[in-house]
Amino acid sequence: MTARPDIAVVGAGPAGMAAAVAAAEAGAHVMVFDEQPGPGGQIYRAIETPGPAGDAVLGADYAAGRGLSRAFRDSGAEYLPGATVWQVSPDREVGVSVDGRARIIKAGAVIVAGGALERPFPIPGWTLPGVMTAGAAQIALKASGLAAADAVFAGTGPLLYLIVDQYLKAGVPVRAVLETTPWSAYLGALPRLPGALLRAGKLRQGLGYIRAIRDAGVPVIRGVSGLAVAGDGRAERVAYTHGGHRHEIAAEHVFVHQGVVPNVNLTRSIGCRHDWDPAQACWRVATDAWGATDVAGIFAAGDGAHVGGAEAARLGGQLAALGALCTIGRIDAAVRNNRGAPIQHALAWELRPRPFLDALYRPAAADRVPAGDDVVVCRCEEVTAGEVRATAALGCLGPNQLKSFCRAGMGPCQGRLCALTVTELLAEATGRPPDAVGDFRRRPPVKPLRLAELAALEPDDTDGGDAGP
Amino acid sequence: MFTEIATDPGAPTVTIVFEGREIATRAGATVAAALLAAGELHFRDTPVGAERRGPYCLMGVCFDCLVEIDGEPNRQACMATVRDGMRVERQRGAAGIGP
Amino acid sequence: MKADAIVIGGGMVGAALAYGLRRQGLDTLMLDEGDVAFRAARGNFGLVWVQSKGFDCPEYAAWTRRSADLWPDFSDEIEELTGTGLQHQRPGGLHVCLSGAEFEDRTRQMRDLSERSGGAFRYEMLERRALDNLVPGLGPDVVGGSYSPLDGHANPLYLLRGLHAGFRALGGRVRLDARVTAIRRTGATYRLETGTGKLEAPKLVIAAGLGTKPLAAMLGMTAPIDPVRGQILVTERARPFLGMPLTWVRQTGEGSIMIGESREEVGFDDGTRWQVQARIADRARRIFPFLERARIVRTWGALRPYTPDGLPIYDRPPDGADAVVASCHSGVTLAAVHAGVLAPAIAEGRLPDDVGGLGTGRFHVH
C-alpha cells in the first residue's frame, strides 16, 4: 500500500495540477486523484491526447494548458487517473475508487480542486435527447473531435461564444445563436467596466469571437427569452421570444449554457461552510486567502471554489498548495507569505474583469427559476417546478424538508442539476433570501459507489497512520 | 448528428455492440462518444416516467447517459471507455440487480 | 396567539399527535423547527415493525401491535385526505440470522415475546429452506430467521408529508422556525415564548424528539432522552425483487434499497463513518450477495431519541396540569396509534391505560 501522502489533491484541472506542482516542488509527497483518464480537467480536457480537433480549432488558451500538464507530469506528484473520489471525511480520509476497488487514504491536508459545472438551465424540454450543455459540445470536440452540424446554441456567458467560434474554425455550420443575456445586464455591468478595461485584451478576445461568428453569417439573436425545446422523444425545434413575438427554429441539437458554478458536493459533504454568492447566484465554499476552509486541513481551489477561469484556478491552486504546506509544517508562515505575495498579486490582476463579467453574464431570473409549473427541475426524480412550489406550500422552509417530501435532489446526480434551482424557487416561495433558505445537505458518497467496494473496506484499510495538522 | 470533424484512417478502431448493432469506433473513446458518433441520442428510459434521455453534460455529473455495459446496469456512458466486443444496451428503467 | 392545544414538534410523533388532536376538533397549533433540525423523522428506515419490539416490556409490545393493526386504515385515511400515498404494505417481515448462535438467540426471544403476549404476537421460526420460498437470492451465510405476519413497512418521508398535509387540510395551524425558549403556566393556561412570538393554550404536548429533554425540564419533568445514531445506506432504484421487508434491508416503493442499521452513541453528531458503513454493507451482501452490484447513492446518520431502556415515554407533569410529554424512536410504527388512540386520550386530558407503565417514574426508581 502507498504511504500516507502529505497532501491529497482532488482533481487534475488547472487548480489541481498547479497545486500538485507547487507542493511537490517543496518536497511534499503529493497524491492526485482525478476521474478522467488524463490530466487537464474540463478546460484542458484531453490535453495530452488531442483528437482530430487540434490547437487550430481549440485555440491558444487551450494549448496553453499543455505546459501545465507537462510540469504536472514532471513534478513527481503521484497521479491516479480514473479515480473517483466518493468521500473526504473532516479528518482528511479520502475515499477513492479505482478500477472497481475502493480504498481510504489518509492525508495530512486535502486540496479539493473538483472544478465547476454548468448552471442548470431549467426550460421546457431541457431533458429531451439532443439537448446538451455547450460544455458537453466542447468536451465532445476536445476529447473526440465530434461536432454536430446545424445546432442551435442558446444562453449566455463567454463559453457559449467560444464553442461557436471553435465550431466555425472546424468548419461546422451553426444554425443560430440565441442570446439570453437580459438587456438589464448590460446596464448592470456598465459601472464595472472601468475595472475590466484594465484587462482589455481579455474583453477584446470575447468581442473577437462575436465578430467572427457574425462574419460567418451565423444569426446571433440577442435579448431572447422564453426558451423552450420541443419534439417527440428528442429535440426537434426550439422556440423563443424575441421582439415581443414567439419564434421557432428546427434543430436536432440544442446546446444550452448559462455560466458555470462551483461543484460544491464534495466540500459540502465534508461540512465546510458555504456562502451564497449574490453576484454569481450560486453557493461557494468559504476560504481564506490560502484556500483554507473552516475545516482543519481541508483546502479548496479553482473554479470549484470560486469561478474565475483557468488562469485564476492555476494561481489559486498554487496558493492552496502554499497554505497546505504551511498547515502540515513543511514551510513556515513567513515563507508562505513571501512566496504567495506575487501569486496573490497576479490573482487579483486576473480577477479584475470578473465583476464586469459576473454582472454581464448573470442569467435572467426567469432562466434560473422557471415560471412555468410544468418545467422539470430535478431531472433524476422528474420533479417539476409546480411540485416544488406545492411542496413548499406544505411549510418547507428549506430544501431538506422539501427533498424528503417530494424527492427533488434524491437521484444519482445528488442535487448537482437542481440544487440551485430548488434554493431559488424556495427563496421565491418563502420570501426569504437564498442564504436563509439554505442548500441540500450533501452526504457521502458524493458519487455512487458499488456496495461491494464499500463492503470490502476493512477498518484498518486507512493507508498510513494518523497524522496531520 | 455528431460526426468527426476530421478522420484519421490510421487510428486504431474497436467494435462495440449497441442494442445488437455493431458500431466501429476510435479506440480510447468514451462509450457516449461512440454512441453519439453513431447517431444515437436515446441512451435510456427513466425509471420514473419512462421518458427518453440522452447525454446532457458529458462530464459525469448529470447521470442522464446511463447505459447497461456488459450486463452491469446504470453505467455512465460518458465515463466509460470502449473495449472491443463490449456489449452496450439502453438502460431501461431501474437497475436490474435482483436475484 | 391562542389555541386549544399546542404541540411542540413537527416530526413523526409531534405531527401524528397534532393531526390526531385536530381530528378531535381541537384548534391545534403545531410548532416546528427550521430546515436543519436533527430530524429523526427524515432519517427513518420505514419499518412498521412488531417482531423486535418490547422483548422485556409486554406493554410496549402490545402498544406496537395495536399500532400495526391500525396502520392500514390510518394509511387509507391520510391518502384520502391528502392524496399522498404512504406506500404502506403488510406482507409480513423477516429477521434473518447469519449463524446458528444468532438463530438460537432469536428463537428464544421470539418464544418469550409470544408467550408474554398471550399468543397475540404471531410468528414462525423458519429454517433456511423455508426462507428460500419466502424471499429469493439469500446468501449461503443465512441459516434461518424469524417471520411475523404482523410486520410491514411504509414510506416514512411520505408519512411525515401526509401528516403535515393532513393536519393543514383539517385546518390545523403551523408555526415554523419556532424554537420554544420558555414555558410558563398561569392557572390553566400554558404560555410559551418562542423566537417568533408568544403563544398560549390550555393544553400542551411536548413531542420534540431530541429537543424534548430541556422542554420537559421546564415542566419539572425528567425525560432522559439522548441521541443514538443510526447509519443507513440507500441504493439507486432497482427493479422490484424483494416482496417483504427485513430488519436490515427493505426495498422502497420507488425501488431503492435501504440498508441499515447501526447504533452508536456519539452525542449530537449526525455525520457518517465509512468504517460503520462498510460493516453495514458487508452484512447486507452476506444476506443478499447480489446487492454487491447495487450502487449506493446516499448515506446518512440519523439521530434517534433513545431512553436508557429503549422504551417510549408518555407522561404528564407532577402538578397535574394538562400537558403530555411523548417520545419514542419508532415514530413510524407508532404513528397510527399516536394519531388514533393517544391523541384522542390527550384531547380528553388523560393518557390511555395501555401506556400507564411508560411514564418517567421508571427512571428514578433507585
Image (cartoon, rainbow, N blue to C red):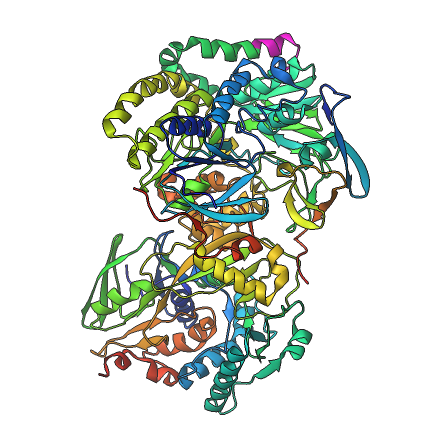
Q: Where is residue A398 in the image (x, y as percent from the top left)?
A: 41, 48
Q: Position of residue A184 (x, y in %)?
A: 45, 21
Image quarter hosting the C terminus of chain A = top left
Residue ID at (56%, 18%): A162
Q: Is residue A44 visible to the viewer in this orientation of the structure?
A: yes
| C65 displayed left or right of C32 | right
- Give the vertical position of A414 relative to C58 (above or below): above
Residue ID at (63%, 36%): B78
Magenta residues (range): A211-220
Q: Is residue C158 visible to the viewer in this orientation of the structure?
A: no
Residue ID at (39%, 43%): A438
| A357 displayed left or right of A375 | left
**Number of callouts:** 0
Q: Where is residue A336 in the image (x, y as percent from the top left)?
A: 28, 26
Indicate yes or no whether the magenta region holds residue C86. Answer: no
| C198 displayed left or right of A177 | left
